[in-house]
Image (cartoon, rainbow, N blue to C red):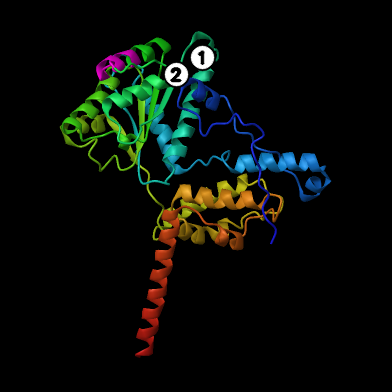
Amino acid sequence: MNSPTIMFPETTKIKPAPRHTKEDLARFLNTIPYEPERHTAAEYAALGTRARTAYDRQRKMFLSGGITIHTPDFLQARLSLAESMNENIHPDRDPSGLILTGDATLGKTTATRMLIRYVHDAYVRQFPDYANHGRVPIVFIEVPATCTGRALMCTFAHFFGMTVARTDTMEMLRQRVVDMMDRVGTRLVVVDELHNLSAANKGNGESVDILRSLHRDVFATFLYAGIDLDTGDLLSGPRGRQIAARFTMMPMERYHPSSEADHEIWRGIIEQFEDALPLLNHKAGSLVALSAYLLERTNGSIGSLGRLINGTANGAVGTTEAVTRALLDKKTIDFAAETARIETLARKTRSRQSAGRIGGTK
């Protein structure tokens, strides 16, 4: 068996998913994912060694993070966010926003990144020279684990490069952050991993009051993403429900084998993945034909599906140049999907054994 080729970054100056400061977010937004051109097997064979290596690197980079899929969930989220931003253009508006929630691996983070790019592209079309005027139209933070209200404000301050003193209270930091957002014209505030914001302090009041005060004082639309925000403690209770009542709550769910509608959507998602694969020998439609298998294999998770297809395709670059059922079977993905797969296989085995016993008694 041939070993897959390992590619390393050409520079050491690379940080993982940099979006946590305004400079890093700007770099992310101004870096357009590069889709490599398509070559036939004959054209690829005619390339020189250096050109072939460079082409393989481009394809692996694209497969490791450049493919974007417009799922129905993303399209609905994009529509809801656009509606909220349009509703919020009046200074005296009753602020609305969007909350993406669901289990891990269901695509919330990917959808959030795509929404950030969508809003940024729209902003650039209206204000193409915004950077020259010091504007920061989008703010993005991830809430640290077991985060308190003050720690949340420190995270916002870090995004803007502010210095935080030990003596700075939460309210002092909050006011500085609000003033900064007003000064730089922030219009979208994205808070990922919101479930990490502690709901245990002061009977859930402090955390929720922070969010409510930001909605009131910042002339921007808020996009929240996190796990179980629709059922957790953070947005429960009278105060939490005031936020939930003004925001569109969009649960992102798994696709289910028992739903024919889900099967149809799933096939469309796989078709998008397949069309994007920059492989030389991949047979069009072969993955769509495996849609039922892929649905079961990934437990209906779009994140697990992406890791399975893209990861398998990445290993096929320079080797088989095609994604096949045999290669997919060998690919190990996230623990949750693999555990669900084992449980499904065990249920099917028990069902066949039970059917055999019943048949034998007739």
How much space separates mark 2 and mark 1, taking CA atoms? 10 Å
Residue 105 drawn at (x, y percent): 43, 47
Report the span colored magenta: 167-177
**What label sits on residue 94 in the rendered view?**
none
Front residue (pair 125, 182): 182
The amino acid type, in three-letter code, at marker 1 is Phe
Q: Is residue 181 above or below residue 309?
A: above
User: SS for tag 2?
Assistant: loop
Front residue (pair 290, 136): 136
Which residue appears at 36% of the width and 36% of the height?
193
User: SS for tag 1?
Assistant: loop
Label 1 belongs to which residue?
127
**What label sits on residue 137 in the rendered view?**
2
Q: Quadrant of the C terminus?
A: bottom left
Q: Quadrant of the N terminus?
A: bottom right
Dot 2: within a 10 Å radius of its alpha carbon, few (fewer than 14), some, or many (20 or more) residues?
A: many
Residue 354 drawn at (x, y percent): 36, 79
Nearer-N-terminus badge (2/1) = 1
